């Protein structure tokens, strides 16, 4: 059989769904950590650390690699992708979902919106990769290598225009909560196409894997990956938002004390005194039951009077030490 020979019809490879499910749960862990930092439950330096940055890249690369494999499986099951209604329905669904995520992100995070994230990349990369699914394996491999190197080879200030940020060929990275430009990320879809062709020919489906409960659970998530992707972060973010209405996180408390101390220092120039005073205020607020509304700037009139008295008392106590 030559490289360009038609792909044989194969059943769905259960391990591919399981791998996609595993990548989804890795993404949940990634976003959970981001949410914990955003709401002040863990160190806010974690999401901007180098290790966390590369973890996000690794998860995104695994998703895109599986997109390429899935394109091969879809063509093996249904025939030429660009003539398949199922392919276009799936593609249109991804485009709509990407648009919805962009709209929501502009509303929630206007300073770092998602204008070209993982779903946008999947949609465009799928269109580019689809004609190469039946090509000799070396073609998607070579094209993938070129896509991977493109930002280093072809980056220019011309691509710094906002309308061209999606290319990935600009000289800087725009601010976004999820930026996956076409280049170099197209490379992983193309590598997935090459990998998929080799795997489909070898028929690597495993019935034993399908009977394993963990693998079966991961496969279920993988088969519903788009729905899983769309709902997991709104659920997590919503839960933490509700929690923030009832509990002040350690990070929020530290931020309050730091802001309080900074304002105090501007008036007294005594850092230690201000730190002790602000920590005392928090302690008294907790004991009196007005810490949560104080943190949310929602004190009732009587609570404001109590807070005023506690601040004076804390300042006096701190001076006496």
Image: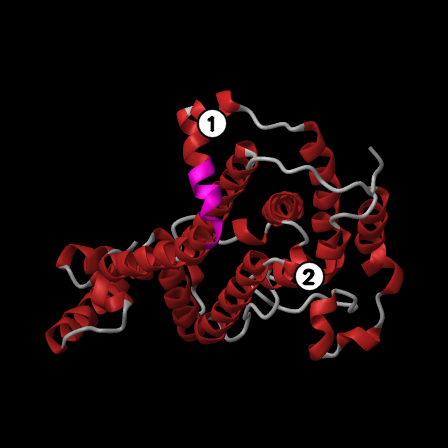
**x and y percentages locating residue 119 in the rendered image:** 57, 60
Regarding mark 2 in the picture, which secondary structure is present there? helix
Front one among 244 and 180: 180
**In which quadrant is the C terminus drawn?**
bottom left
Q: Quadrant of residue 77?
A: top right
- Please say whether residue 203 is one of the residues in the magenta stretch: no
The type of colouring in the image is secondary structure
Q: Which residue is mark 1?
A: 210
Front one among 158 and 63: 63
Would you place residue 137 above or below residue 88 in this image?
Answer: above
Q: Quadrant of residue 257?
A: bottom left
Would you say 72 lies left or right of 18 here?
right
Q: Residue furthest toward the left? A: 302
Front one among 64 and 301: 64
Which secondary structure class fits the magenta region best?
A: helix
**In which quadrant is the N terminus drawn?**
top right
Front one among 125 and 316: 125
Q: Which residues are magenta?
A: 219-226
- Please say whether residue 222 is one of the residues in the magenta stretch: yes
Disc 2: CA contacts within 10 A as few (<14), some (14-19) or many (>=20): some
């Amino acid at each position: 059989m030559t490289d360009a020979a038609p792909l044989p019809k194969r059943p769905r490879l259960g391990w591919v769904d399981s791998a996609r499910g595993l990548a989804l749960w890795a993404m949940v862990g990634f976003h959970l950590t981001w949410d914990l930092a955003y709401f002040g439950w863990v160190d806010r330096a974690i999401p901007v650390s180098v290790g966390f940055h590369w973890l996000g890249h690794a998860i995104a690369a695994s998703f895109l690699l599986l997109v390429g494999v899935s394109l091969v499986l879809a063509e093996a099951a249904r025939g030429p992708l660009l003539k398949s209604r199922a392919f276009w329905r799936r593609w249109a669904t991804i485009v709509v979902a990407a648009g919805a995520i962009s709209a929501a992100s502009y509303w929630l995070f206007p300073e770092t919106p998602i204008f070209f994230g993982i779903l946008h990349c999947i949609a465009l990369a799928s269109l580019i990769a689809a004609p190469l699914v039946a090509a000799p394996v070396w073609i998607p491999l070579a094209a993938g290598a070129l896509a991977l190197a493109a930002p280093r080879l072809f980056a220019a200030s011309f691509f710094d225009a906002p309308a061209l940020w999606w290319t990935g060929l600009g000289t800087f990275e725009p601010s976004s909560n999820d930026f996956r430009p076409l280049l170099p990320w197209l490379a992983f879809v193309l590598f997935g196409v090459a990998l998929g062709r080799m795997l489909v020919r070898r028929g690597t489906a495993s019935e034993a894997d399908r009977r394993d409960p963990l693998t079966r659970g991961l496969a279920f998530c993988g088969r519903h990956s788009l729905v899983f992707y769309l709902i997991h972060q709104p659920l997590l973010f919503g839960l933490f938002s509700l929690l923030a209405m009832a509990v002040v996180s350690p990070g929020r408390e530290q931020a309050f004390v730091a802001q309080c101390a900074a304002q105090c220092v501007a008036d007294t120039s005594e850092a230690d005194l201000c730190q002790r005073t602000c920590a005392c205020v928090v302690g008294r607020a907790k004991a009196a039951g007005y810490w949560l509304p104080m943190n949310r700037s929602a004190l009732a009139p009587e609570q404001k009077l109590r807070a005023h008295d506690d601040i004076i008392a804390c300042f006096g106590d701190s001076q006496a030490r």
